[in-house]
Image: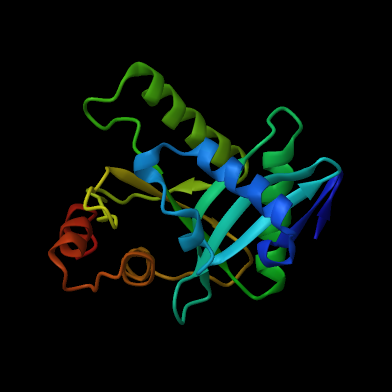
Amino acid sequence: MSAPGGRLVEAGSLPAGELAAVRAIYEGAFPDELQAPFEDLLVDRLLVHVDADGPAGLALVRDLGPTSWTFLRYYAVGRRGRGTGSAMWADLAALLAEEGRTRLVWDVEDPDEPGLSPALVEEHRRRIVFYERLGGRLLPVRDYEPPHDDGHAPRLLLMDVPLGSGDEAPLRDVVEAVFRWRYGRTASDPVVRRTLEASGLA
Protein backbone atom coordinates (compact mmCIF):
# COMPACT_ATOMS: atom_id res chain seq x y z
CA MET A 1 0.00 0.00 0.00
CA SER A 2 1.81 3.10 -1.12
CA ALA A 3 0.69 6.68 -1.47
CA PRO A 4 2.79 9.40 -3.07
CA GLY A 5 5.68 10.07 -0.71
CA GLY A 6 4.87 7.31 1.76
CA ARG A 7 3.81 3.78 2.56
CA LEU A 8 1.92 1.98 5.30
CA VAL A 9 3.89 -0.59 7.31
CA GLU A 10 3.39 -2.76 10.37
CA ALA A 11 4.94 -1.20 13.49
CA GLY A 12 6.66 -4.47 14.32
CA SER A 13 8.82 -4.13 11.22
CA LEU A 14 10.32 -0.81 12.35
CA PRO A 15 13.71 -0.42 14.06
CA ALA A 16 13.77 0.89 17.62
CA GLY A 17 14.58 4.47 16.60
CA GLU A 18 11.61 4.72 14.25
CA LEU A 19 9.31 3.09 16.80
CA ALA A 20 10.37 5.79 19.27
CA ALA A 21 9.31 8.38 16.67
CA VAL A 22 5.92 6.66 16.40
CA ARG A 23 5.57 6.86 20.17
CA ALA A 24 6.32 10.59 20.05
CA ILE A 25 3.60 11.10 17.42
CA TYR A 26 1.11 9.22 19.58
CA GLU A 27 1.96 11.03 22.81
CA GLY A 28 1.90 14.40 21.07
CA ALA A 29 -1.46 13.84 19.42
CA PHE A 30 -3.68 12.94 22.36
CA PRO A 31 -4.21 14.42 25.83
CA ASP A 32 -3.05 12.29 28.75
CA GLU A 33 -6.60 11.28 29.70
CA LEU A 34 -7.16 9.73 26.26
CA GLN A 35 -3.89 7.84 26.12
CA ALA A 36 -3.27 4.22 26.95
CA PRO A 37 0.35 3.30 27.75
CA PHE A 38 2.17 3.05 24.42
CA GLU A 39 3.25 -0.54 25.10
CA ASP A 40 -0.40 -1.51 25.51
CA LEU A 41 -1.13 -0.40 21.94
CA LEU A 42 0.97 -3.23 20.59
CA VAL A 43 -1.68 -5.81 21.53
CA ASP A 44 -3.64 -4.39 18.60
CA ARG A 45 -2.47 -3.78 15.05
CA LEU A 46 -0.36 -0.63 14.82
CA LEU A 47 0.12 0.58 11.25
CA VAL A 48 2.57 3.39 10.54
CA HIS A 49 2.75 5.76 7.59
CA VAL A 50 6.43 6.17 6.68
CA ASP A 51 7.70 8.77 4.24
CA ALA A 52 11.17 9.94 3.22
CA ASP A 53 11.65 11.59 6.61
CA GLY A 54 10.57 8.57 8.65
CA PRO A 55 7.34 7.83 10.55
CA ALA A 56 4.72 10.46 9.74
CA GLY A 57 1.51 9.04 11.19
CA LEU A 58 -0.14 6.05 12.82
CA ALA A 59 -3.38 4.10 12.76
CA LEU A 60 -4.19 1.63 15.53
CA VAL A 61 -6.87 -0.85 14.51
CA ARG A 62 -8.66 -3.85 16.01
CA ASP A 63 -10.96 -6.28 14.21
CA LEU A 64 -14.36 -6.44 15.88
CA GLY A 65 -14.52 -10.11 16.80
CA PRO A 66 -16.05 -12.45 14.21
CA THR A 67 -17.51 -9.58 12.14
CA SER A 68 -15.94 -8.19 8.98
CA TRP A 69 -15.62 -4.78 10.66
CA THR A 70 -12.53 -3.07 12.03
CA PHE A 71 -12.40 -0.51 14.83
CA LEU A 72 -10.02 2.43 14.57
CA ARG A 73 -8.71 3.12 18.08
CA TYR A 74 -6.24 5.89 17.27
CA TYR A 75 -5.39 7.92 14.18
CA ALA A 76 -2.68 10.57 14.34
CA VAL A 77 -0.47 12.54 11.99
CA GLY A 78 2.92 13.79 13.09
CA ARG A 79 3.69 16.26 10.33
CA ARG A 80 0.77 18.34 9.14
CA GLY A 81 0.33 20.25 5.91
CA ARG A 82 1.75 17.54 3.63
CA GLY A 83 -1.43 15.63 2.92
CA THR A 84 -0.24 12.81 5.17
CA GLY A 85 -3.59 12.35 6.89
CA SER A 86 -5.48 11.88 3.62
CA ALA A 87 -2.79 9.68 2.06
CA MET A 88 -2.58 7.44 5.12
CA TRP A 89 -6.38 7.15 5.20
CA ALA A 90 -6.51 6.07 1.55
CA ASP A 91 -3.82 3.46 2.20
CA LEU A 92 -5.57 2.20 5.33
CA ALA A 93 -8.96 1.87 3.62
CA ALA A 94 -7.42 0.10 0.64
CA LEU A 95 -5.45 -2.31 2.82
CA LEU A 96 -8.43 -3.27 4.95
CA ALA A 97 -10.67 -3.69 1.90
CA GLU A 98 -8.09 -5.99 0.29
CA GLU A 99 -8.12 -8.05 3.48
CA GLY A 100 -11.90 -8.47 3.22
CA ARG A 101 -12.91 -5.94 5.85
CA THR A 102 -16.20 -4.26 4.96
CA ARG A 103 -16.49 -1.38 7.43
CA LEU A 104 -14.20 0.84 9.47
CA VAL A 105 -15.76 2.18 12.69
CA TRP A 106 -14.41 4.69 15.21
CA ASP A 107 -15.51 7.14 17.85
CA VAL A 108 -14.81 10.85 18.17
CA GLU A 109 -15.25 13.38 20.96
CA ASP A 110 -18.63 15.11 20.94
CA PRO A 111 -18.15 18.88 20.41
CA ASP A 112 -21.49 19.51 22.13
CA GLU A 113 -20.42 17.96 25.42
CA PRO A 114 -21.18 20.47 28.20
CA GLY A 115 -18.27 22.26 29.82
CA LEU A 116 -15.80 22.16 26.95
CA SER A 117 -13.64 25.19 26.26
CA PRO A 118 -14.18 26.97 22.93
CA ALA A 119 -10.79 25.68 21.77
CA LEU A 120 -11.79 22.07 22.46
CA VAL A 121 -15.16 22.52 20.77
CA GLU A 122 -13.41 23.80 17.66
CA GLU A 123 -10.84 20.99 17.76
CA HIS A 124 -13.55 18.33 18.02
CA ARG A 125 -15.53 19.89 15.16
CA ARG A 126 -12.44 20.04 12.94
CA ARG A 127 -11.75 16.38 13.58
CA ILE A 128 -15.27 15.38 12.51
CA VAL A 129 -15.04 17.53 9.37
CA PHE A 130 -11.70 15.89 8.52
CA TYR A 131 -13.23 12.43 8.69
CA GLU A 132 -16.34 13.50 6.76
CA ARG A 133 -14.12 14.85 4.01
CA LEU A 134 -12.60 11.38 3.75
CA GLY A 135 -16.02 9.71 3.47
CA GLY A 136 -16.76 9.17 7.14
CA ARG A 137 -20.38 9.21 8.32
CA LEU A 138 -21.72 10.29 11.69
CA LEU A 139 -24.02 7.51 12.86
CA PRO A 140 -27.36 8.32 14.57
CA VAL A 141 -26.21 6.94 17.93
CA ARG A 142 -27.10 8.80 21.13
CA ASP A 143 -25.93 8.62 24.76
CA TYR A 144 -22.79 6.85 23.63
CA GLU A 145 -20.42 6.99 26.59
CA PRO A 146 -18.35 3.80 26.66
CA PRO A 147 -16.34 3.40 29.86
CA HIS A 148 -12.56 3.58 29.50
CA ASP A 149 -9.95 1.69 31.47
CA ASP A 150 -9.33 4.60 33.83
CA GLY A 151 -13.01 4.80 34.75
CA HIS A 152 -13.98 7.96 32.90
CA ALA A 153 -16.69 7.86 30.23
CA PRO A 154 -16.44 10.81 27.83
CA ARG A 155 -19.38 11.68 25.62
CA LEU A 156 -18.51 10.36 22.19
CA LEU A 157 -20.02 10.08 18.73
CA LEU A 158 -19.75 7.03 16.51
CA MET A 159 -18.60 7.24 12.89
CA ASP A 160 -18.01 4.73 10.12
CA VAL A 161 -17.02 4.38 6.51
CA PRO A 162 -17.93 1.46 4.24
CA LEU A 163 -14.94 -0.33 2.73
CA GLY A 164 -16.83 -2.20 0.04
CA SER A 165 -20.27 -3.20 -1.10
CA GLY A 166 -22.51 -5.74 0.52
CA ASP A 167 -22.32 -4.59 4.15
CA GLU A 168 -25.93 -3.76 5.03
CA ALA A 169 -25.85 -4.74 8.70
CA PRO A 170 -28.38 -3.14 11.06
CA LEU A 171 -26.98 -0.27 13.10
CA ARG A 172 -27.79 -2.11 16.32
CA ASP A 173 -25.40 -4.90 15.32
CA VAL A 174 -22.63 -2.37 14.73
CA VAL A 175 -23.18 -0.67 18.09
CA GLU A 176 -23.26 -3.97 19.96
CA ALA A 177 -20.10 -5.15 18.19
CA VAL A 178 -18.23 -1.99 19.16
CA PHE A 179 -19.26 -2.32 22.80
CA ARG A 180 -18.45 -6.03 22.89
CA TRP A 181 -15.16 -6.19 21.01
CA ARG A 182 -13.72 -2.75 21.75
CA TYR A 183 -14.99 -2.07 25.28
CA GLY A 184 -15.78 -5.54 26.62
CA ARG A 185 -19.46 -4.81 27.35
CA THR A 186 -22.22 -7.20 26.34
CA ALA A 187 -25.65 -6.21 25.03
CA SER A 188 -27.18 -6.74 28.49
CA ASP A 189 -24.87 -4.21 30.14
CA PRO A 190 -26.78 -1.10 31.36
CA VAL A 191 -24.33 1.17 29.50
CA VAL A 192 -25.09 -0.61 26.23
CA ARG A 193 -28.82 -0.71 26.91
CA ARG A 194 -28.88 3.04 27.54
CA THR A 195 -27.21 3.75 24.20
CA LEU A 196 -29.49 1.39 22.31
CA GLU A 197 -32.62 2.83 23.90
CA ALA A 198 -31.58 6.46 23.37
CA SER A 199 -30.81 5.67 19.73
CA GLY A 200 -34.14 3.91 19.10
CA LEU A 201 -32.38 0.58 18.61
CA ALA A 202 -33.65 -1.39 21.61
Can you say which quadrant of the picture contains the N terminus? bottom right
**Residue 183, x across and y down, in percent:** 32, 64
Question: Percent from the top left, x then y, of residue 21?
Answer: 67, 45
Residue at 41% in and 36% down = 31
Horizontal side, residue 191 vs residue 69: left or right: left
- In the rendered image of this protein, does residue 1 appear above or below residue 6? below
Q: Residue furthest top?
A: 118
Q: Colour scheme used in the picture?
A: rainbow
The residue sitting at 24% across, 62% down in the picture is 201
Q: Which residue shows up at 22% across the image and 60% down it? A: 196
Q: Looking at this rendering, what residue extends furthest in the bottom direction?
A: 66
Side of 37 relative to 191 (left or right): right
User: How far from the left and from the top, in percent, is residue 37?
Assistant: 44, 54
Q: Could you say where residue 159 lies in the image, as x and y percent from the top left?
A: 45, 50
**Picture layout, residue 47 above or below residue 143:** below
Left-right relation of 164 to 174:
right
- Furthest toward the left, the residue is 190
**For the image shown, how many numbered marks are present on the structure?**
0
Of the 4 image quadrants, the one containing the C terminus is bottom left
- Quarter of the rendering containing residue 96: bottom right
In this view, which residue lies farthest toward the front? 16
4 relative position to 80: left or right: right
Residue drawn 73% across and 55% down?
Answer: 91
Q: Nearer the viewer, residue 56 or 117?
A: 56
> Which one is in front, 16 or 26?
16
